[in-house]
Image (spheres, coloured by chain):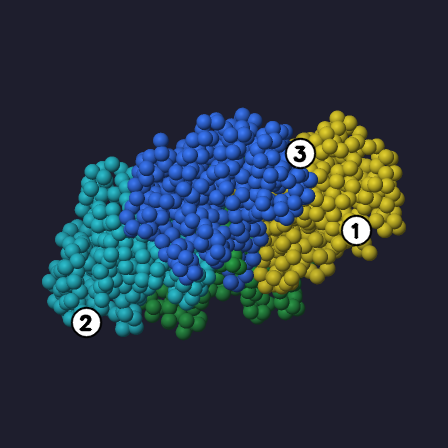
Chain colours: A cyan, B yellow, C green, D blue
Amino acid sequence: MFNIALFGAGRIGRVHGANIASHPETRLAAIIDPDKKAAMKLASKYNTRLMSVSEAMENPAIHAVCIASATDTHADLIERSAMADKAILCEKPIALNPTRIRQCLDIVHQRNMPLLVGFNRRHDPHFALLQQRYAQGAIGKAESLIITSRDPLPPPIEYVKVSGGLFRDMAIHDFDMACFILGESPVSVMARGQCMVDPEIGKAGDIDTAISVLTFPGGAMATIINSRRSACGYDQRIELHGSEGTLTVTNVRENQVQLWNESGFQQARPEYFFLERYKKSYQAQWQHFVEVLANQASPCCNGHDGEQALIIADGAAESLRTGQPVTLPRLR
Amino acid sequence: MFNIALFGAGRIGRVHGANIASHPETRLAAIIDPDKKAAMKLASKYNTRLMSVSEAMENPAIHAVCIASATDTHADLIERSAMADKAILCEKPIALNPTRIRQCLDIVHQRNMPLLVGFNRRHDPHFALLQQRYAQGAIGKAESLIITSRDPLPPPIEYVKVSGGLFRDMAIHDFDMACFILGESPVSVMARGQCMVDPEIGKAGDIDTAISVLTFPGGAMATIINSRRSACGYDQRIELHGSEGTLTVTNVRENQVQLWNESGFQQARPEYFFLERYKKSYQAQWQHFVEVLANQASPCCNGHDGEQALIIADGAAESLRTGQPVTLPRLR
Amino acid sequence: MFNIALFGAGRIGRVHGANIASHPETRLAAIIDPDKKAAMKLASKYNTRLMSVSEAMENPAIHAVCIASATDTHADLIERSAMADKAILCEKPIALNPTRIRQCLDIVHQRNMPLLVGFNRRHDPHFALLQQRYAQGAIGKAESLIITSRDPLPPPIEYVKVSGGLFRDMAIHDFDMACFILGESPVSVMARGQCMVDPEIGKAGDIDTAISVLTFPGGAMATIINSRRSACGYDQRIELHGSEGTLTVTNVRENQVQLWNESGFQQARPEYFFLERYKKSYQAQWQHFVEVLANQASPCCNGHDGEQALIIADGAAESLRTGQPVTLPRLR
Amino acid sequence: MFNIALFGAGRIGRVHGANIASHPETRLAAIIDPDKKAAMKLASKYNTRLMSVSEAMENPAIHAVCIASATDTHADLIERSAMADKAILCEKPIALNPTRIRQCLDIVHQRNMPLLVGFNRRHDPHFALLQQRYAQGAIGKAESLIITSRDPLPPPIEYVKVSGGLFRDMAIHDFDMACFILGESPVSVMARGQCMVDPEIGKAGDIDTAISVLTFPGGAMATIINSRRSACGYDQRIELHGSEGTLTVTNVRENQVQLWNESGFQQARPEYFFLERYKKSYQAQWQHFVEVLANQASPCCNGHDGEQALIIADGAAESLRTGQPVTLPRLR
């Protein structure tokens, strides 16, 4: 049984809290959040206690941390946890500043603590199965990867302003997915974007509709199709075209009911948004982290992967700004 | 090049006329119909001539006949054509009286003329492929066959009154399909029916909604689901469950366009009715008949098959009347 | 918080145990099973205690019972629970003897205790949504209901011999589903069956392939398609044809991955069997029972419904034996 | 009845020949091809005669021409036909040299003769319906258009060498489709490409895998996904995401048969290549041209459209070469 300290009692914190509490091998041992009301509500539900950051870090009974707090606290908490010899699951991104990421990862490396970065979609059973079948050779050599990732609605404009922009906030999941599926890192990125959905997003200096093309060392290209709006709901699909076939993941529907009448045949929408669509991903991610804690696995998405996705996102943003394709640095 | 005399210039006659005229190896040589106006219109379109029945029968240049006239003329025309040494394609049914059918088939047999009975759905590319794959062993031994066959709307009540009833008029296609797919004739039939769609149909002594269950010598059962009404349009599907898998044919849609929005995903309806859905079946049927004419094939649906389907239909009607399952006679 | 005594620590008992333990408003307070090893294993997992039947019945802290023990214990346990003023969720069937069922339900009625009979499929989110949309008028008046219910593999022959036969053991779920969807009880049943899958089943006096047709007071017919074998896995579908449209529930697939290659497009199989396919049904059933306990709902599937399904099953068995349709008694 | 002279008796010429001959309002009056054997074979099939170019141009009984000859003859034949007052249907492209196109179109314009350029996919019933529904407002304002267009196999390397390259030969259809659907011309194009399928294509200076992104005046982006290889067969799909929904066209399958077994559910491949997939497009295109001849319509795809598509293709090729996005000239 592993004792877990959960940093952050917000929306994602609650998802992690439920998974930690219901997993037979983990105990939700502490909740840390400056928002005491949210923290107490969660602690009460799972019959656990509040701690300060220091208390959690200094408590030798805490085996690991789950960091779901505000983005600007991630790097500090990772470092402190690593120094305190606690294994770490941290929501993406590690930080928005590449230098800060590097510092943080150096410390994790020195302390030799496992760090799982929370690109939860790698654990989605459908996407993971696609990746596995590709890796097993089901379609030969990859030629073209198409990722469609469209949100049902844009976030509040206040969130947009502090989000780091569409590439860092939203497309970053898809950049990571492309690397995960193809098993390598891209050599260049080229992006085009528009503000089509909400003029306020444009006024905030951001875009809401984007196409990014990544080129990989072997020649394969990945095309990422993003939008902050999808009238039919959350649109999350992948197509991987290979030399001997294609693997796809289609949308997961809300239900299997169909209505047939003179207007045609109607099926249900996709599951509405990420909390519904990726519910099983978060559960599988936690299961994977437990295996990491038990020394049965190494993190499938480590600090290097987190750094890589941010570098691609920043390259895409630069490409959008300059109109030029951007060559990406080799991380190692 | 084979010269063809077409009996009947009505709806189905026009379908056959177009196929005869456009086939590279057949010529529409004569049209025979007591409705002179309809006959002349068709003759004008295809630049051919009108004939009387006797003229056509006595004309040695006519190689074959296509009988698409009123049902009560079928048996006589088949007999006269056989006596005149002309190959025959005749729309179903041969007759509504089993004794009459037997007389007629005896003459065809004595003259040794090929007779193709027009159960066009045997030539539907989808159903024919299902039958072929089953015959090739794709799913092992057949256990249960489900045929769904639902018309978009009931025919006019005047037609219903002279149609011979749902089983002889409509389900007969499905009874033939069951024999075609399973490659044998049923030993018994049991039917249940209701008048759900239009009370006028009930007043006319007929039903509009029916379930028939055929049992075959090997134990396989075929369930036929019929309705005179289908709000989503013509619903024509088959499922064949076997020991090692299932083969199905789904509906053919009017188009491939989908609309995705907050109400869900909408696809097009099935093709509206049999002239659209089975257009290719009539073409393939004509191609098959040309091969029969060229001695390259024997009729895939012969007089025996036509007789068999009517016997099943009459058994179903008896079962509906008595509430009992009906044992079917062995034809040969 | 309601304290629950769970009778039965077998396969279904474990499903209920997990749902009881994870529901925020119920506590697994006792496990009762003559198989002490199975009972202790479950008690250890959920940190609860073993009891004898008498201890559970006499313990005033137990609010309700969940009966998932052997079929022949159901009626006794229901009666004792009702006498002890405990609300009851009991797996189907109440008993295999109609007289015994009636005695039992009389006692439940006298004690005025809520009894929820475990036809879990009523709680399947897909089927429940179909029923709801039909009840709301989405397709007008029901005309024909088709339920396909085919198991991946037959159960062990030892189980078959004591199962009560295909109609009581397997089709009974579909008979209940037909009543649930159409909202009324059938007036007659007619059934045909064969032994196609395993000759041993035939030697045991049972069938493995069946077609049942129920006729309802309003004229609608329900056709139930059953098989003990489905090579593609658990095949659970519904089609409801109405005067203004059709509602269907298609199979739930194991995953959304598709493989496209020269052989065609391949999708995943249906979820393998009922523990996977109906996992959410059991959860939703428990949620409903909690609402019953909280006086927020009355049992959606009561003793009368359980009795009704068995009466239909016995009518189907009689119809199979005699070859005749069987008129069903009006329960009340 | 319109008399048509057909230039070219090759693969596409034969498609047009069949449509001309079977249309009730057109007669195949002459075939012109330097390959006498091919020309005679076609003339014999349709019972028509051979002509020289001059004979056809000077024959006043010829109302219109269908130009399906070698690409480098298109512009000359268009000009001579226009000078001879014959209406023109010409296969794409008009020419590979923009200046030559402009000269040619000027003459067509001066003579005021109708010119229909053969981007047949505009007449595909599925794509045309998508365009129509979008134009009618079914999904609000267009935001992102995705066109997938992947050939089953690369053409022979000899063809590749003279094809003008992937953008001019293959993607040009998709560039035209984007303009057709969105109803406007793009302001810029950016393209990325690779040689992934066959190294010989790379040696010939061409690519076989490409992603092009067009930006339109209103901000909408069109992403074109091209490959010379698709292991599952011809992959032709469109997705148009708008402010209020999405319209898609999925692949047309070879048949509706499905096989369900323990490996999953298998459907048929898409129709194999363009002669099968776009058979109805060529027929509908000919119907449209007959309406143009009868002054009932103006060409839905005129010389301007043909010029536009080539300009985009050349822009894409330049973008690929330079790595930069290319601003496209405004045609008028």
How far separated are the C-alphas under marks 2 and 3? 79 Å
Residue C52: name its quadrant.
bottom left
Say if residue A48 shows up in the picture.
no
Q: Residues within 10 Å of mark 1 (few under 14, many from 20)?
A: some
Amino acid residing under circle 1:
His
Which disc, if any, is residue B304?
Answer: 1
Q: Give the image location of residue B118, x and y in percent.
A: 73, 45
Quadrant placement of the N terminus of chain D: top right
C223 relative position to D218: left or right: right
The residue labelled by disc 2 is A112
How far separated are the C-alphas under marks 2 and 1? 83 Å
Q: Closer to the camera, D105 or D201? A: D105
Say if residue A134 shows up in the picture.
yes
Q: Give the image location of residue B179, x and y in percent.
A: 71, 53
- Which residue lies at the image location 58% right of the left edge and 66% below the top edge? C160
How far separated are the C-alphas under marks 3 and 1? 28 Å
Q: Closer to the camera, A64 or C319? A: A64
**Tags 3 and 1 on a common chain:** yes
C103 relative position to D240: left or right: right
Residue that protrudes farthest toward the left in the picture: A54
